[in-house]
Image (cartoon, rainbow, N blue to C red):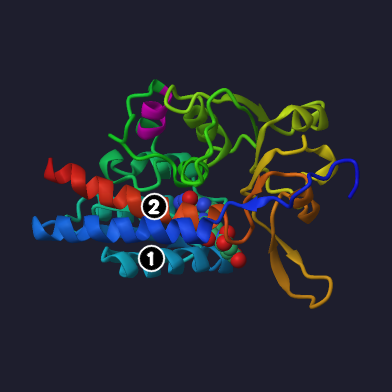
Amino acid sequence: MNLYTTPQPARILDGKATAAAIKSELTERVTALKAKGVTPGLGTVLVGEDPGSKWYVGGKHKDCAEVGIESIRKDLPEDITQAELEAVLDELNNDPACTGYIVQLPLPKHIDTHAILERIDPAKDADGLHPTNLGRLVLNVSEPLDSPLPCTPHGCVELLLRHDIDLKGKKVLVVGRGVTVGRPLGLLLTRRSINATVTLAHTGTEDLAAELAQADVVIAAAGMPHMVKAEDLKPGAIVLDVGVSRVEDEETGKAKVTGDVAPDAKDVASWISPNPGGVGPMTRAMLLANVVEAAERQTR
Ligand SMILES: Nc1nc2c(c(=O)[nH]1)N[C@@H](CN(C=O)c1ccc(C(=O)N[C@@H](CCC(=O)O)C(=O)O)cc1)CN2
């Protein structure tokens, strides 16, 4: 045991099991919707051949089948033009079978991602990334859930709440200011219903170690392998690992997914999310929740 270790190893924030419980609740809500004549349908838009993106989209369709949501798949070539891609979005905007859809990110460099996200009908924005829905998050008019929340931030909060972790008054350090995770997560955590005190660290942060040392909760979403190490953490900190980097496995030479949190962090933390098996499955579950909620709004 070194100076930083806590007496017991960290407890696991089990994203896989939590996501399975959420999916089972959603299955019941889908059954109730179908009884009212509404079948939720998720559309996915995938551009290009990136193996990671293909895997994520495949997972989304598998999840839909599990809970009874229909799915519509638009797989498009890497060299698609902005206008052609916008035409596909217009098709989904006008398709009554599609209650919500996502555009898998990142998009190729020649595509204007902001313009694409703005083209999504905000009522069908299953990722909660349309400026109207992000604006609703800023204005706090989406509480409790009148508009979709971005899936990964929502998944992080839900993972903590479902392990009975109260964030009220806690100092939460979010590392990373990206639009899909860091920024919306900061907004979500500062809602009155959660009431955390949030610091958003980024590449311009001068002394990340000092911020980490003070944080009760660390949510690492920077995409930098093993940047959060045991010696940086306050003993007993709660640690969520959102990072996804593909690196070469030194033993096998094959690509493997590595998170932002070093393995030894588990010796210091009180709770830790595994990666894989933590925030990733929660991201998937929250997407399904957004689709079901969009369909439920149609019935109100
Ligand atoms: N339109 C979007 N694009 C992207 C999002 C998003 O929320 N919306 N997030 C990520 C990718 N993503 C979903 O799309 C995603 C990432 C990771 C997982 C996941 O379950 N990961 C597994 C491990 C997977 C592996 O081994 O590669 C885990 O953590 O257990 C699901 C979804 C970027 N793009």
Does residue 152 appear to the left or right of 63 in the view shown? right
Q: CA distance from mark 1 to mark 2?
A: 10 Å
Region rendered in magenta: 133-138
- CB of mark 1 within 8 Å of CB of mark 2? yes
Judging depth in this view, the residue of 122 and 201 nearest the camera is 201
Disc 1 target residue: 63
Amino acid type, label 1: Asp
Secondary element at image label 2: helix
Assess whether residue 143 is covered by the magenta stretch: no
Q: Position of residue 266 (x, y in %)?
A: 74, 51
Q: Quadrant of residue 280?
A: bottom right
Considering the whole magenta stretch, tell me its main secondary structure: helix
For the residue carrying disc 1, how many other residues have a C-alpha within 10 Å: few (<14), some (14-19), or many (20+)?
Answer: some
Q: Is residue 54 above or below residue 237?
A: below
Name the outermost residue toward the right.
2
**Which one is nearer the viewer's eye here, 220 or 161?**
161
Q: Amino acid at mark 2?
A: Leu
- In the rendered image, the vertical position of residue 99 relative to residue 114, given as above or below: below
Q: Residue at x 81, y 26 (%)?
A: 206
Query: Observer-nearest residue: 90 or 69?
Result: 69
Residue 271 image point, x, y percent: 65, 46
Can residue 47 be seen here? yes
Question: Secondary structure under badge 1?
Answer: helix
Which numbered disc, 1 or 2, marks the residue that appears first in the sequence?
A: 1
Residue 259 locus on image (x, y percent): 69, 54
Quick check: is the Cβ at mark 2 less than 8 Å away from ligand 1? Answer: yes
Q: Quadrant of residue 214?
A: top right
Could you classify mark 2 by the number of other residues whose Cα lies within 10 Å: few (under 14), some (14-19), or many (20 or more)? many
Residue in the picture at 55% in, 25% down:
196
Q: Is residue 106 visible?
A: no
Which quadrant holds the C terminus?
A: top left
Relative to 239, 76 lies left or right = left
